[in-house]
Structure formats: structure tokens, C-alpha cells
Amino acid sequence: MILLRHGQSEFNLHFTATRKDPGIVDPKLTPLGHEQAEAAAEALAGEDIRRIIASPYTRALQTAAPVARKLGLPVTITPVVRERYAFSCDIGTPISQLAGAWPDLTLDHVEEIWWPQAEEGAEGVIARAAEFRGSMAVHPDWPHTLVVSHWGFILALTGTSAQNGTWLRYDPTQPAPEKIIWKP
């Protein structure tokens, strides 16, 4: 499978510069983030991707959109691959509002408020990653799946700190990482 971290968001831009939470809820991609998403779509066009899974955060949806367009595939939305809830950017948009902004997505299986209401500890995101790893390891299409996700989830799943707009190959049949270093 391929894991793609969303492109640069408004939050990433400000947080990287100041190391302080800028208070941006469910941020959109910056112009650079859109460029990264388009570049990922071009780079992934030659891969044998048959299924796209994405987090419901706007930045992930905006990153998945050009890939889905390029490959002619629908995007399956699942909160399981969302970011670790720790900053203002991890407050999502209610499903009823996302449905208005993204009318082509099937969202009726997602709860209205799909993100946690309190900070998620490392063990929480590691547990979600383990659940996802287990479900994907037995799914016949895992080698042909693209997952558009976030720094914390990808780190919990792989032990790798992915940069905005980058992608990596991942085999969910392999064991969980032995050590995770939670430094952005």
C-alpha cells in the first residue's frame, strides 16, 4: 500500500514558523499544499492504485482529490486514518458541512462529529494504527490501496515521520514499529 501525507496546510505553515498552535480549525491546504497534492497525483499515476482511502479532514480531502481525479477512482472516507487529536487543526468539520463542500463523497457512514473531544494520547493513535494495520493485512486489495493521512497516524503505523506531500510504501503484514519518536 502507499501512504500519502496531506500537502502543506495553513496550520503547518504557521506552526512550522512559530512552533505555536495558530488556532486554525480543520485547515485547508496552502498554495504549496495544492502543488504538493498535484505533484503526488502525477507521481502516483503510474502506480497500480485501485482504491483510495482518506481521512475526513479537509487537508486530506484536498490532497486526495487530484489523485482520485487523475486515476478516476472514488475516495473512501474513514476517521480511523485521521490525525492524532492534539492541536486546533485536529478539530474537524461536521459531516453535514463536509457533505455540502464535497457532494461527490459518500459520507453517510461517518458520524456527524467524528473526531475526539479530548486530546488523544500516543497509545490511542497507536491502537488505531494497529486496528487499521490488522484490517488491511487481510484485505485482498491492500497492495493497490492509497491512504491519504497525517503525520501522527503515519508515524504510529510505520515509525516514519513523513513530510507534507510525501508518500511511502507500506506493508501492513509486517510487525508494528518497535519504537516511535513523537517529535514533529
Image (spheres, grey):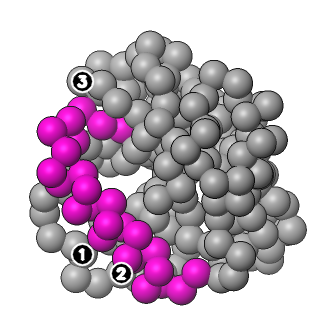
Q: Is residue 137 left or right of residue 25?
A: left
Horizontal and vertical percent position of residue 105: 60, 29
Q: Earlier in the sequence, mark 3 or mark 2?
A: 3
Q: Amino acid at mark 2?
A: Ile
158 over 35 or under it: above or below: below
SS category of the residue bearing label 1? loop
Expressed as whole percent of the image width and height from the top left, the position of residue 6 reads 56, 46
Task: Look at label 1 and name its amino acid.
Answer: Pro
Q: Is residue 115 left or right of residue 159?
A: right
Answer above or below: position of 155 versus 141. below
Q: Total of numbered circles in the picture?
A: 3
Q: Quadrant of the C terminus?
A: bottom right
Left or right: 173 with respect to 114? Answer: left
Do the residues bearing badges 1 and 2 touch, measured as CB atoms within 8 Å?
yes
In this view of the protein, which residue sits in the foreground, 165 or 121? 121
Of the image marks 3 and 1, the number of the one nearer the N terminus: 3
Q: Is residue 122 magenta?
A: yes
Question: Residue beneath label 1, please?
Answer: 177
- In the rendered image, residue 104 lying in the magenta stretch gets the answer no
Q: Residue at x 46, y 74 (%)?
A: 125
Read off the residue under disc 2. Answer: 180
Which quarter of the rendering shows the N terminus? top left
Q: Which mark is residue 48?
A: 3
Residue appearing at x 80%, y 74% in the figure: 21
Vertical relation: 128 (above or below) 7: below
In the image, the segment drawn in magenta is 120-146
Give the residue displayed 22% in from the left and 73% down from the top: 176
